[in-house]
Image (cartoon, grey):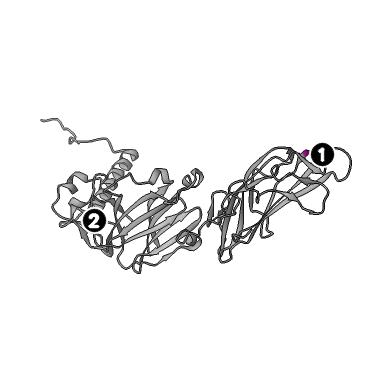
């Protein structure tokens, strides 16, 4: 009689919760990859561009108008091509794609996703033709393509980091996915002020930068060099004490008109900045007949333009012993009104205790070319 045996059971350890979670995570990653590949590839495209995606181009757009936008430090040249549905793969740099090897080997074009279009853009940056200070050149600016409610930065940095190389033949170029019904514009932002170019019409809204496109000539003060005409004299012509004409000379550089100052920023709408440099010679003493009194101290040099004080003054405001002063002043002026008179004043403190102790001196410089 055969002994009874219980039926053999094949058993295996049950999976732990951690192993289940790991398996589910791996499955989810695979599904995401498959969905991504499905979205960015198709049977008739090497790559599908989504709205907001930006790819480097290897050839400049050939069917768009060229536009120039000026900022204080540079001129930006932009060209925006007509939106298209597809671009030859050979014209697009696909190196940074996850499936770059497959995309590069495809004979199919790069296509826009459903409801999107491809916009080719090129841009270049060169220094301002009028030159600019190191402070102005260091101010960063941004160039962006705006499509409807979306925007894509094309360039962001200072002139030094963005300027195009000399004799450059291939400026930076991009292929950008946009909503096919979106209106297109180029924005350039410099120190808080934005200029907007309507791509369809070519109209440029310059905003506060308007003065950069129609620069005004500098105004000659007639005192750029020390002349007999340009000297300080006592405010009271009847004063018995007078300064020596050859001892109180002053130079005032040409008055330059511009919409932007590196410290003050953009001039307000309807205004401009007017800047000049001033150099006053040391006044050592004053005379009265054969009498002479030396000057102990020279007060701050006060400069006004049509009676208005400057918005910024450098190197002229200190009260010190006798000595030359070299500085500059910046005024806010009306964009449509030419300034008429530049005035410079200074109080001299004379030696001794006799009156007067203080002798004001000044000069009024007409800006109409007349003596």
Q: Secondary structure at mark 2?
A: strand
**Quick check: marks 1 and 2 in contact, CB under 8 Å?**
no
**Quarter the C terminus occupies:** bottom right
* Distance between the alpha carbons at the discs numbered 1 and 2: 87 Å
Sequence-earlier tag: 1 or 2 = 2
Horizontal and vertical percent for residue 262? 54, 49
In front: label 1 or label 2: 1
Lateral position of residue 109 relative to residue 208, left or right: left
Residue drawn at the location 34% of the way across and 46% of the way down:
164
- Which residue is tagged 1? 293
Q: Secondary structure at mark 1?
A: strand
The answer to which of 5 and 182 lies nearer the viewer is: 182
Residue drawn at the location 39% of the way across and 63% of the way down:
197
Residue 142 is inside the magenta segment: no
**Quarter the N terminus occupies:** top left
Dot 2 alpha-carbon crowd within 10 angstroms: few under 14, some 14 to 19, many 20 or more: many
Lateral position of residue 236 relative to residue 65, left or right: right
Question: Which residue of the protein is positioned furthest toward the left in this rendering?
Answer: 1
Lateral position of residue 113 relative to residue 269, left or right: left
Residue 294 is inside the magenta segment: yes
**Picture layout, residue 335 above or below residue 172:** below
Q: How many marks?
A: 2
Lateral position of residue 9 relative to residue 315, left or right: left
Question: Which secondary structure type mostly characterizes the magenta part of the structure?
Answer: strand
Q: Which residues are magenta?
A: 292-296
Quarter-wise, where is residue 180 in the image? bottom left
Horizontal and vertical percent for residue 246? 69, 43
Quarter-wise, where is residue 317 in the image? top right
- Which residue is tagged 2? 48
**Picture layout, residue 238 above or below residue 17:** below
């Amino acid at each position: 009689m055969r002994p009874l045996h219980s039926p053999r059971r094949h058993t295996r350890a049950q999976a732990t919760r951690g192993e289940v979670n790991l398996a589910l995570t791996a499955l989810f990653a695979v599904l995401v990859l498959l969905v991504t590949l499905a979205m960015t590839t198709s049977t008739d495209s090497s790559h599908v561009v989504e709205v907001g995606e930006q790819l480097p181009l290897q050839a400049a757009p050939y069917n768009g108008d060229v536009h120039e936008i000026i900022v204080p430090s540079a001129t930006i040249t932009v060209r925006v091509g007509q939106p298209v549905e597809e671009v030859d793969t050979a014209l697009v740099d696909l190196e940074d794609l996850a499936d770059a090897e497959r995309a590069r080997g495809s004979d199919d074009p790069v296509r826009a996703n459903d409801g999107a279009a491809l916009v080719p853009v090129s841009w270049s940056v060169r220094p301002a033709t009028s030159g600019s200070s190191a402070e102005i050149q260091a101010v960063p600016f941004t160039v962006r393509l705006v499509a409807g409610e979306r925007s894509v930065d094309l360039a962001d940095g200072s002139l030094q980091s963005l300027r195009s190389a000399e004799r450059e033949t291939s400026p930076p170029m991009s292929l950008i996915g946009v909503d096919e019904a979106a209106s297109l514009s180029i924005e350039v932002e410099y120190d808080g002020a934005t200029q907007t170019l309507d791509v369809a019409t070519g109209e440029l809204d310059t905003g506060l930068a308007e003065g950069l496109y129609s620069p005004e000539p500098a105004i000659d003060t007639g005192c750029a060099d020390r002349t007999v005409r340009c000297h300080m004299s006592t405010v009271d012509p009847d004063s018995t004490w007078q300064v020596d004409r050859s001892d109180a000379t002053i130079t005032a550089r040409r008055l330059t008109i511009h919409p932007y100052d590196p410290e003050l920023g953009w001039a307000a709408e309807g205004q401009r900045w007017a800047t000049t440099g001033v150099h006053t010679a040391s006044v050592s003493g004053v005379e009265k007949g054969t009498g002479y009194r030396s000057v102990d101290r020279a007060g701050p040099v006060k400069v006004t333009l049509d009676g208005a004080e400057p918005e910024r003054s450098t190197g002229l405001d200190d009260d010190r012993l006798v000595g030359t002063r070299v500085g500059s002043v910046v005024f806010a002026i009306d964009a449509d009104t030419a300034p008429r008179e530049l005035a410079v004043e200074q109080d001299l403190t004379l030696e001794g205790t006799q009156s007067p102790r203080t002798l004001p001196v000044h000069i009024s410089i007409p800006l109409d070319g007349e003596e």
